[in-house]
Amino acid sequence: MPDKRRPRSWFHCDIDFLAQDTIAELCDEFGPAGPLTIFALITEAKRADLGGLRPPGEQGVASIRARALGRLVGAPEETVTAVVARSVEARLLKYLDGTDLDAGRIVVRSLKREQWEPNDATAAARSARKRSREA
């Protein structure tokens, strides 16, 4: 359970995430569990990134048990496993070493991370202003 005394972490997400064809197809096939499974994997990867658990070159990786993912999504383990498998087929995700769906272990990287989690445009502008002030 998150500590309510400290600010919660957050991240940017594409406002058209749910409108993408591949995400809509997951919804058609699996109901709301389809898109929610992908979104939960994105948040789990971001949690690891923000927690400093992965070096920059390895960021964007979600490592989670299928049972825990099912609990987050409110869907059976078999459903989230099927969503992940379909998402790999659709080239939304990529399996990484350590994945064993039969054993319920999911280790994936988002192949659409840059589209789903765009850079903060204002951060780039702030950095440019800071560089110009320091010059």
Image: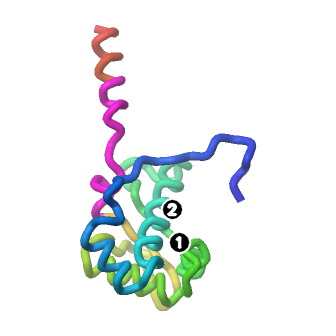
Counting from the top left corner in percent of width and height, residue 1 is at: 71, 59
Count all numbered tags in the image, as a single digit: 2
Which quadrant holds residue 69?
bottom right
Residue under label 1, please give it: 64
Q: Which mark is residue 44?
A: 2
Residue sitting nearer the eye, 124 or 45: 124
The segment highlighted magenta reads 111-126
> Is 95 left, or right, of 104 in this rendering?
left
Amino acid bearing label 1: Ile
Residue beneath the point at 37% across and 72% down: 96
Q: For the residue carrying disc 2, how many other residues have a C-alpha within 10 Å: few (<14), some (14-19), or many (20+)?
A: some
Which of pointers 1 and 2 indicates the residue nearer the eye?
2
Which quadrant holds residue 130?
top left
Instruction: Say what secondary structure mark 2 lies in.
Output: helix
Counting from the top left corner in percent of width and height, residue 82 is at: 41, 87
Based on the picture, tell me whether residue 120 belongs to the magenta stretch: yes
Above or below 61: residue 129: above
Q: For the residue carrying disc 1, how many other residues have a C-alpha within 10 Å: few (<14), some (14-19), or many (20+)?
A: some
Residue beneath the point at 40% across and 54% down: 59
Amino acid bearing label 2: Glu
Instruction: Say what secondary structure mark 1 lies in.
Output: strand
* Magenta highlight: main SS: helix
Return the disc, 1 or 2, that comes first in the chain's sequence. Answer: 2
Cα gap from disc 1 to disc 2, whole angstroms: 8 Å
Counting from the top left corner in percent of width and height, residue 64 is at: 53, 72
Residue beneath the point at 29% across and 70% down: 92
Residue beneath the point at 73% across and 47% down: 4
